[in-house]
Image: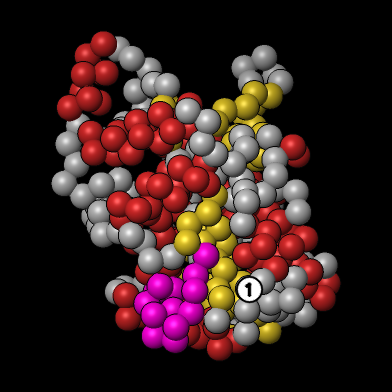
Amino acid sequence: MRIVVLTGGIGGARFLLGVRAYARQVGAEVTAVVNVGDDLRLHGLRVCPDLDSVMYTLGGGADPERGWGRVGESWTVKDELAAYGAEPSWFGLGDKDLATHLVRTTMLDAGYPLHQVTEALATRWQPGVRLLPATNDRLETHAILSADDGGQRAIHFQEWWVRHRAQVPTHRFVFVGADSAKPAPGVTEAITEADVVLVAPSNPVVSITPILAVPGLREAVASGPAPVVGVSPIIGGAPVRGMADRCLEVIGVECSAAGVGRLYGGRSAGGLLDGWLVAEEDAQTEVPQVSVRAAPLRMTDEAATTAMVRAAVEMA
């Protein structure tokens, strides 16, 4: 069996722990297609938050308390940058994490594409799944805000999320570079050759939608032979973690399992989904032309997460 997971963020990384465990039980191969819309340049370094969250989590190096970054992290470089007054001061890189970005940037500057760099970095962490960026090309999620002069201005999603905590009036999100981006080598092939495609319980607006914004990827998922099953990131009308509710509010979508399910839509109606796995609290959810099933969705440990994945695959 070949399983492809569209994923991003901390929730997606933790979901992959269950996918990997399930795959080992049934002898399946897993490819994770990871969002790069959060990527940015800081102090001259290429930072890939979602790729790193997945790599560290699957490799056993993620900080379980913060949910992001490295366990046992130190912040000497961050403190020294602050002493110089270097900006941006609102986004800090830990010392261990910094090593990853140094290696990545050196390889990218030497001409290696991001998918090859990601493969090289993963040799240290042995994630047990194949990690692919959605694209090697520039793709950045920006938030469009009101400007002081009455117009509008754009800021990088990370500034909107980390610096402003999503608490500024926002008109919409745009995916800069998406129009000209191409799927990274292996991504389209993985989707079209999969036996099942899973949409992780990641933020639907800024983790999954940027992946689908890469020309050809939405079509590959929607028209491919594999059944597509999504897992709701909303339980009882609220996100399990993060600020998916604020992102959904910006695009005018109800923060509910039904709202996100309708956002993705049914494949027979021009959307993505064949199946939609929701929490037991949302068992009455209905999504037009999509099969809906309820199961426990709180990823309290690997066993619980593996059971979630098994329920999703069984829907397929």
User: In the rendered image, which residue does mark 1 sit on?
Assistant: 194
Looking at the picture, does residue 104 appear above or below residue 203? above
Q: Is residue 287 visible?
A: no
The N terminus is located in which quarter? bottom right
Q: Quadrant of residue 97?
A: top left
Question: Which residue is painted at 70% across and 40% down in the image?
Answer: 181
In the rendering, at what x and y percent does residue 106 appear? 40, 29
Looking at the picture, does residue 152 appear above or below residue 262? above
In the rendering, at what x and y percent does residue 296 appear? 43, 82
Residue furthest out toward the top:
84
Q: Quadrant of residue 297?
A: bottom left
Q: Amino acid at mark 1?
A: Ala
Question: Which residue is painted at 49% across and 74% down in the image?
Answer: 29
The C terminus is located in which quarter? bottom right
Within 10 angstroms of label 1, few (less than 14), some, or many (20 or more) residues?
many
Q: Could you say which is closer to the camera, residue 190 or residue 269? A: 190
Question: Which residue is painted at 38% across and 52% down in the image?
Answer: 122
Looking at the picture, does residue 101 appear above or below residue 290? above
In the rendering, at what x and y percent does residue 180 appear? 74, 37
Mark 1: which secondary structure?
A: loop
Question: Which residue is painted at 67% across and 49% down in the image?
Answer: 183
Magenta-span inclusion, residue 282: no
Magenta-span inclusion, residue 20: yes
Q: Which residues are magenta?
A: 18-31
Magenta part, dominant SS: helix
Q: Is residue 58 visible?
A: yes
In the rendering, at what x and y percent does residue 47 appear? 43, 35
